[in-house]
Image: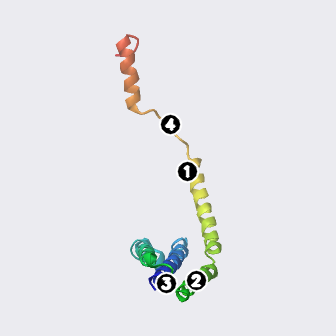
């Protein structure tokens, strides 16, 4: 049964991470997409679920092969997680956010490249050149 528990934990944490992507990538962040929620809620629960799922799924490996009923339940859990992931439409929901990010990035690049660029040589290199010239007798003193 630990194999089933592990697969269910992996499926739930994967769905949790997908939900976190949808909530946190939204440019109009709400309270559940804030940096605090990302750092202290979304990420730890995703990582803990993945770790717990891997550990639980690994535990019965020496006792293989599992029963037929357990394998059917594991396949049903994988199928349920896959169906729920497909129903979430993660890729389609993230596309508009990506387009908005690209527009914002293009606007900031335009604003940054529109200003004149002043390139100066750092003073340390000027001092070094002056020092070498003065030692040879051709430079400034």
Residue at left offset 38%, top offset 21%: 130
Q: Where residue 4 is drawn, which disc sits there?
A: 3
Mark whose residue sits in front, 1 or 2: 2
55 sits to left or right of 69 = left
Q: Secondary structure at mark 1?
A: helix
Q: Position of residue 111 (x, y in %)?
A: 57, 53
Rounded to the nearest angstrom, the CA distance separating label 3 from label 4 is 63 Å
> Can residue 53 be spotted in the picture?
no
Q: What is the quadrant of residue 79 in the picture?
A: bottom right
Q: Nearer the viewer, residue 127 or 77?
A: 77
Q: Which mark is residue 10?
A: none
Q: Which residue is mark 1?
A: 112
Give whichever of discs 4 and 2 has the lower sequence position.
2
Measuring 38% from the left and 74% from the top, which residue is drawn there? Answer: 40
Q: Residues within 10 Å of mark 3 (few under 14, many from 20)?
A: many
Q: Position of residue 23 (x, y in %)?
A: 52, 76
Which type of secondary structure does the marked residue at label 4 adopt?
A: loop
Q: CA distance from mark 1 to mark 3?
A: 54 Å
The answer to whether 7 appears left or right of 48 in the picture is: right
Q: Could you tell me if the residues under marks 1 and 3 are in contact, i.e. CB atoms within 8 Å?
A: no
- Residue highlighted by disc 4: 119
Earlier in the chain: of badge 2 and badge 3, it is 3
Please tell me which residue lies in front, 108 or 77: 77
Q: Residue furthest top?
A: 137
- Residue at mark 2: 75
In front: label 3 or label 4: 3
């Amino acid at each position: 049964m630990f194999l089933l528990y592990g697969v269910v934990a992996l499926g739930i944490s994967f769905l949790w991470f997908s939900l976190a992507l949808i909530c946190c990538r939204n440019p109009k962040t709400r309270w559940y997409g804030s940096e605090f929620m990302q750092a202290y809620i979304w990420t730890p629960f995703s990582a803990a679920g993945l770790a717990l799922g891997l550990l639980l799924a690994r535990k019965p490996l020496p006792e293989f092969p599992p029963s037929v009923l357990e394998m059917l339940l594991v396949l049903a859990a994988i199928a349920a997680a896959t169906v729920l992931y497909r129903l979430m439409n993660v890729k389609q929901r993230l596309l508009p956010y990506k387009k908005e990010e690209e527009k914002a990035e293009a606007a900031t690049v335009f604003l940054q490249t529109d200003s004149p660029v002043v390139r100066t040589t750092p003073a340390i290199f000027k001092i070094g050149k002056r020092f070498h010239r003065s030692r040879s007798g051709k430079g400034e003193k």
